[in-house]
Amino acid sequence: MAAVRAHVSLRATGAVARRQFVSRVSRYVLLAASLVGIIVLAYLTYDTLNTGASRLSWDFLNSYPSRFAERAGLRSSILGSAWVMGVTVLLAFPVAIGTAIWIEEFAPKNWLVTAVKLNLANLAGVPSIIYGILGLTIFVRFADLGPSIMAGALTLALMIIPMTVIAAEEAIKQVPQSIRDASLAVGATHWQTVRSHVLPEAMPGIMTGIILAISRAAGETAALIMIGAFTFIAFDNTSVKDDFTTVPIQIYNWTIRPSQQGFQVNASAAIIVLMGAVLTLNLLAALIRERFRRE
Amino acid sequence: MLTRAEFEDPNLLALALRRRPLRRSGEFVIVGLLTLCAAISLLTTALITYVLVSEAATFFQEVSFREFFLDTEWQPLFKPVSFGIWELVAGTANVVFWSMVMALPLGLATAIYLSEYAAPRTRRLLKPMLEALAGVPTVVFAYFAINVITLEVLMPALETVGVDLPVFNSFAASLMLAVMILPTIASISEDAMASVPRDLREAAYGLGSTRLEVAWRVVVPAALSGIVASVLLAIARVVGETMIVAIAAGSTPNLTLSPFETIQTMTGFMLQVGLGDARRGTTDYQSLFAVGMMLFMITLLFNVAATLLVRRFREEYE
């Protein structure tokens, strides 16, 4: 009689094998699902470049809008965007940092600071078109600024302050308490400590938040249309009292034209310009975050 | 001032200085300025509320609450005018529903993959790409919704099966809205999953669970409050999004949940008024503020619900 050899195997059989198989397959299904968004983004990028790249030229960047697609360009909208962004940053930056410092360093620990924080979280979720209505009623009409660069910048500043404050608060919170203690112990006052030690330490985080907020404002369309910036501008902006248009508004304007007039190519080319700017800002924010990452 | 005891013990000194930092006489001015900065955010909320309420009040002098909430037709620009908000709310509900149908499975799958499956290297590669999606201006998505999704993909595809898709339809808008909110759902859900304690996973593995079973039956239920919060925030963003729906979904109020019809959302109507030259004081112009108030309250509701949910369940496993 031949010896019986026992086979001992750890390989699962039956129901267990089935469960393990399903689990192994799930990895690829989930990976595929994760890639859908990225594939869509890649396809859209390809499509835009394909349609719009040939239209990109110095002439396109340097021409005013026009009734004729091949003569129209981005000059006034790029200048308008630059003006509005610049003024928005000047208005929002100090207020946002001031609010964050007050909340983290000077606020009495009571209901007031809770209310301010809750209020900021809710303001960050208010749709941009509501800020547009606010700007239209208060800045354009009540303060009589008209649909000017100043009115647009004030509107966008109110819109980006909440998200900037939240980012700045996080950055200030990350500064180790020992740095404050050391400064206070050698006789620095509260404000000296904040100005010379807390703020410099928190600056990379604050900058990241501000750059992301600028990129959000740079792409904003609805709020500016609401305040009346959907206009034909064929001159260079020279003051904050000027009417203006911006690159996203110009994209909107070209997108809604009937497709046979050739404006879609202009819209694609303008999208390349806008996305280039926005992605550069996002990349910059990511680089600052990586460079100053606190362990 | 510091007491002698506090001055002599370094620990007490640190505590005392943290609690009562030294101050120079002029610094109250600085603290006052900082408080003023913080007051601006409170003022913003007050102004938004004031503008919406006072201007909507003018509207409701002309149009009764009864008509606004019970009529089912929204036709402010042509006679006979009628102001029944539900057609616009239905338009918004339409894109919310279809964008969630698309974004929820994908967003959840992405979160599960990133949190439970992906190697650190894959994660470092995938996350920034997803975040890039979050940075795309919505007017760009809007351009794609109409020029690529509707005109190049959907209309030719549906024509072969004999379905006539209108140029402006809620499907293309919902698809782009889904892409827009994918990063919101994925990253907030992933954060929630990452904070589920390791012990729970190890206990499940110890009982012989597979990776999928651990992810789906242990991690997802444990992170459910965060996942639901991410969905609520995403809904609030879709409700408030303007450009995609205004450009791709059309401007015909329509009481339907069908994705293949032309609709108008609340934000779409507001933009239409903003673009037009309706004169201040006319009822159709004032309706902007009534719709705006409705929009404001709906987004506020979803945002507050998300905040409360996260706060209520945050420390469950600590």
Image (spheres, grey):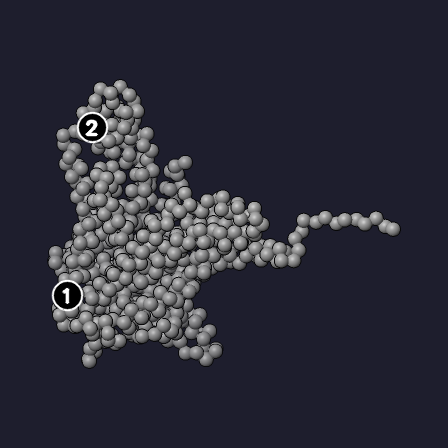
Q: What kind of element bears circle 2? A: loop
Q: Position of A74 compared to B44: left or right?
A: right
Query: A140 or B302: nearer the eye?
Result: B302
Query: A35 or A248: nearer the eye?
Result: A35
Give the quadrant of the C terminus of chain A.
Answer: top left
Callout 2 amino acid: Leu
Q: Position of residue B251 (x, y in %)?
A: 29, 72
The residue depicted at 27 percent of the width and 53 percent of the height is: A122
Query: A181 or B225: nearer the eye?
Result: B225
Q: Earlier in the sequence, mark 2 or mark 1?
A: 2
Q: Is residue B150 above or below residue A101?
A: below
The residue to which callout 2 is attached is B22
Say which mark, if any, is on residue B57: 1
**Is residue A188 visible from the viewing direction of this image?**
yes
Q: Is residue A142 above or below residue B92?
A: above
The residue depicted at 39 percent of the width and 69 percent of the height is: B171
- Name the chain letter of the residue that bears numbered label 1: B
